[in-house]
Amino acid sequence: MIGEEILSELMILLITGLAALVLTLEDWRGWLLAWALMGAGGGWLLQQTPGVPGQLASIQVLTSALLALLLYLTGWQARKAAPKTLTSRPPVHWRFRALAALFFHYLARILAARFPIPIAPAPILITTYTLIGIGLLIATLGRSPLQVGLGILTMFSGYGLFYFSVQDSLLAIGLMAGMNLVIAFLTAALTLVRQEASA
């Protein structure tokens, strides 16, 4: 029991660190790799949650991998024509962004302790609040459509973790995966449109 709690705590910190990397890195390939690993970590966290079917964890991992692949192919296509469209100098220094990610993680712990939701375990709540906060920060501070889209997908990943832990309806889970796919396609389209405008 104590070993599982330590593993859950380490996974929460790993997911938070990966989300913070999406926020602080300046290379688009680093964003996508960190985001895909964050999705895999979320799947592992769901796997360890009692009462959650193992298929849901697989859906979380596969969805993250497919979306990261789609966005990587988009970034690769945009990089060939106009590399400046993917990355630009961030308006806020990386140290401030890392500090803001730590603040959101601390705030998530406080919210999960003060206002627990009985139907969801604490590790899921902490990760959900952290990902929603960091995703909002990524979307707000992002200077390219790819990074803004990753911020929105990070928020949806946080909400998806919570939703998958309390709901096992395949229709609802399919709708959430479809929403993530629509956001990824919109992100890809906006990235390519910006690349054409910059060329």
Image (cartoon, rainbow, N blue to C red):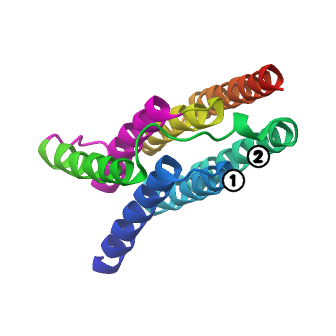
Using a 10 Å C-alpha cutoff, classify the residue at mark 1 as few (fewer than 14 neighbours), some (14 to 19) or many (20 or more): some
Judged from this view, the residue extending furthest toward the left is: 114
- Label of residue 29 in the image: 1
Could you tell which of marks 2 and 1 lies nearer the N-terminus? 1
- The residue shown at (16%, 49%) is 113
Q: Residue 112's spot in the image, x, y percent?
A: 22, 46
Quadrant assignment for the C terminus: top right
Q: Nearer the viewer, residue 160 or 50?
A: 160
Q: Is residue 11 above or below residue 66?
A: below
Q: Is residue 158 above or below residue 44?
A: above
Q: Quick check: 178 left or right of 168?
A: right
- The residue shown at (41%, 56%) is 16
Q: Label 1, secondary structure: give it.
A: helix
Whether 63 is among the magenta residues is no
Q: Indicate the amino acid at tag 2.
A: Tyr
Q: Which residue is mark 2?
A: 72
Pair 2/1: label in front: 1
Q: Residue 152's spot in the image, x, y percent?
A: 52, 31
Using a 10 Å C-alpha cutoff, classify the residue at mark 2 as few (fewer than 14 neighbours), some (14 to 19) or many (20 or more): some
Q: Residue 145's spot in the image, x, y percent?
A: 63, 29
Majority SS type along the magenta span: helix
Q: Label 2, secondary structure: give it.
A: helix
Q: Nearer the viewer, residue 6 or 153?
A: 153
Whether 122 is among the magenta residues is yes
Q: Residue 154's spot in the image, x, y percent?
A: 51, 40
For the record, the magenta segment spans 115-142
Q: Quick check: 47 left or right of 193?
A: left
Pointers 2 and 1 in contact (C-beta within 8 Å):
yes
- The residue shown at (70%, 46%) is 68
- The residue shown at (61%, 39%) is 88
Judged from this view, the residue extending furthest toward the bottom is: 3
Q: Is residue 173 visible?
A: yes
